[in-house]
């Protein structure tokens, strides 16, 4: 038995005057901007009775009509041990981990590998039930191919507190990245909006209509063919460091997705980007004190650094 699609219609608030259609849908209906763009591309969005594309602009007071997508199959959390995932800190409110490569923060459609959430469940941790069902307790993420520090909320209050701190950009997130060549200047700021890549769905890029994205970097050590940078994120866009350094013509060593030299990666024995979340500082949700955590480089990054240091002697 077929059923009619669910149609929802809402007036565009004056505060969204001039926004793109996909951005307005995301704000008004709670979709991701990617999903909103997909609905528009499928002809399932109308403004005042006319089908519109994702990049058209809306006016305050216009009627935005969306054909709602069917319910997706729920993503299941599988309790599965994660090899190499270390517990750095654990208390009643938070657990801080060192995430290895090859591990996603949480389950998602199409991902069949291990996850931080599943690893914590397998270890007997009970975490916050706030947030979407498949990402409970997750307040920030690292790419599957990026290692380093992550904090996960265990209590409901911790989840709310940490989400607020990330939103207000008061969390101190530090990364070390080995990038090709030598940035000029050696210390600086990259302020360039990031959005979906116009040709490749799996990539991101600096785009005129992207979200504001700011990356600060400082030189730690210069080698013959690469530079080790200390990077502080002011914003937290997907692939932000990788996209900004590539756009700056200094991609992370080993990051073949964003234009790194494959011969250098092979010479250093790298099978992923040289990028590691080394420090994480924030206000502890329990007592309000400032806490900081640090992580050493995993073995593959340490060996690659040793090799490039040897080449520079």
Image (tube, rainbow, N blue to C red):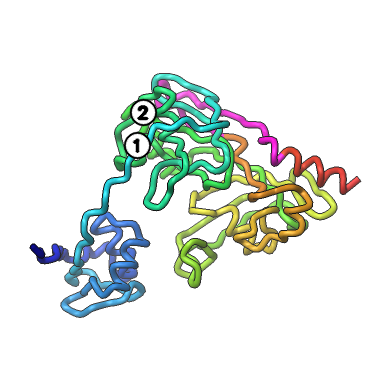
Q: Is residue 273 left or right of residue 3?
A: right
Question: Camera-side residue: 26 or 290?
Answer: 26
Q: Quadrant of the C terminus?
A: top right
Q: Dot 1, crowdedness within 10 Å: few (<14), some or many (≥20)? A: many
Give coordinates of residue 175: x percent, y percent. Answer: 62, 42
Upstream in sequence: badge 2 or badge 1: 2
Give coordinates of residue 184: x percent, y percent. Answer: 75, 59
Q: Residue at x 47, y 21 (%)?
A: 90
**Is 285 colored magenta in this rendering?**
yes
Q: Residue at x 64, y 55 (%)?
A: 255
As drawn, the label of residue 127 is: 2
Toward which corner of the image does residue 304 lie, by quadrant? Answer: top right
Q: Are marks 2 and 1 in contact (CB under 8 Å)?
A: yes
Question: Camera-side residue: 298 or 62?
Answer: 298
Q: Residue at x 30, y 33 (%)?
A: 129
Question: Camera-side residue: 58 or 176?
Answer: 176
Give coordinates of residue 272: x percent, y percent. Answer: 64, 50
Q: Residue at x 42, y 27 (%)?
A: 122
**Is 50 colored magenta in this rendering?**
no
Q: Is residue 268 left or right of residue 279?
A: right
As drawn, the label of residue 256 is: none
Residue picked out by circle 1:
136
Label 2 residue SS: loop
Which range of residues does the magenta coloring cover? 280-301
């Amino acid at each position: 038995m077929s059923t009619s699609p669910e149609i929802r219609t809402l007036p565009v608030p004056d505060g969204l005057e001039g926004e793109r259609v996909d951005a307005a849908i995301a704000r008004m209906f709670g979709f991701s901007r990617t999903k909103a763009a997909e609905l528009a591309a499928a002809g399932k969005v109308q403004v005042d009775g006319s089908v519109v594309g994702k990049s058209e602009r809306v006016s305050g007071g216009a009627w935005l009509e969306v054909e709602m997508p069917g319910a997706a199959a729920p993503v299941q959390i599988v309790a599965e041990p994660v090899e190499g995932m270390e517990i750095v800190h654990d208390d009643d409110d938070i657990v801080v981990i060192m995430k290895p490569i090859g591990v996603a923060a949480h389950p998602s459609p199409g991902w069949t590998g291990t996850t931080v959430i599943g690893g914590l469940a397998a270890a007997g941790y009970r975490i916050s039930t706030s947030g979407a069902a498949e990402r409970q307790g997750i307040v920030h993420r690292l790419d599957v191919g990026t290692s380093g520090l992550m904090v996960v909320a265990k209590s409901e209050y911790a989840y709310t507190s940490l989400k607020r701190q990330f939103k207000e950009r008061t969390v101190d997130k530090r990364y070390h990245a080995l990038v090709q060549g030598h940035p000029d200047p050696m210390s600086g700021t990259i302020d360039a909006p990031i959005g979906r890549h116009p040709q490749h769905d799996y990539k991101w890029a600096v785009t005129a209509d992207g979200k504001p994205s700011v990356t600060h970097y400082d030189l730690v050590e210069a080698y013959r063919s690469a530079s080790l940078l200390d990077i502080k994120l002011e914003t937290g866009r997907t692939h932000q460091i990788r996209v900004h350094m590539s756009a700056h013509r200094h991609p992370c060593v080993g990051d073949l997705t964003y234009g790194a030299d494959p011969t250098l990666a092979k010479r250093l024995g790298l099978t992923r980007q040289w990028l590691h979340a080394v420090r994480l500082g924030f206000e502890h949700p329990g007592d309000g004190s400032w806490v900081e955590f640090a992580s050493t480089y995993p073995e593959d990054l340490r060996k690659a650094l040793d090799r490039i240091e040897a080449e520079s002697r």
